[in-house]
Image: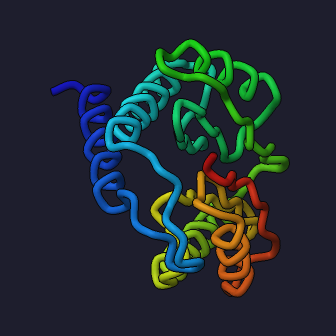
Amino acid sequence: MNTPLKLVLVTALASALALLAGCSKPSESTGAPAPRTSVGTEIDDSVITTSVKTALLSDPDIKSFDLKVDTHKGVVQLSGFVDNAAQVERAITVVRGVSGVTDVENKVSFKGVETTVGNKVDDSVVTTRVKAALLADASVKSLDIAVVTRKGEVQLSGFVDNQGQATRSIEIARAIPGVSQVINDMSVKK
């Protein structure tokens, strides 16, 4: 099996597992029901996410491993860190060309100076700690939140059920040792 096909299959499996783990649970922080999204919409969004990731990986001008992709009702949110504005514009163009995409939210940040191997290791430890802390908090639907760290700066992105989840996620991330700043690029589901 060739590498791009393996990547597509792994991404599709991960999306399906995330879908099953987070299907329409009531909001634990407010007691209110979660916004209605059908299983069909969730599956369509997973297919769109997988298609977007595949398209980004296939484009030689985009370092797509530095980008996170989240989809809600056809709206694709791009986040992460890239080298320059040309990469952002190219990524948005590629995403808009994917079937089923209704809109693109650009939450991408610029890397700035080059990181060292030590920074990359430290950042991966911070990312792991933030993800673990988010998973441990029952009021946060953390499978819908992407975490990317660069030089201690944590970017939280994705779609959350309400502003309370976003606020709580930021509080959790700020409390993690090694976090110098938290960028909130989360969007509330419509």
Could you tell whether 101 is left or right of 87 in the image? left
Q: Residue at x 30, y 39 (%)?
A: 12
Q: Nearer the viewer, residue 83 or 21?
A: 21
Q: Count all numbered tags in the image, as a single digit.
A: 0
Q: Residue at x 78, y 22 (%)?
A: 86
Could you tell whether 5 is left or right of 173 in the image? left
Q: Residue 39: horizontal and vertical position, in percent?
A: 32, 43
Question: In this picture, is 111 found above or below 51?
Answer: below
Q: Residue at x 61, y 74 (%)?
A: 126
Q: Residue 4: horizontal and vertical position, in percent?
A: 31, 26
Q: Nearer the viewer, residue 172 or 7?
A: 172
> Considering the image in quadrants, where does the N terminus appear?
top left
Q: Residue 68: horizontal and vertical position, in percent?
A: 57, 44
Q: Residue at x 55, y 19 (%)?
A: 60
Is residue 142 in view from this perspective? yes
Q: Residue 10: horizontal and vertical position, in percent?
A: 27, 42
Question: In this picture, is 53 found above or below 35?
Answer: above
Is residue 134 in view from this perspective? no
Could you tell whether 124 is left or right of 36 in the image? right
**What kind of colouring is applied to the model shown?**
rainbow
Residue, far left: 1
Q: Quadrant of residue 82?
A: top right
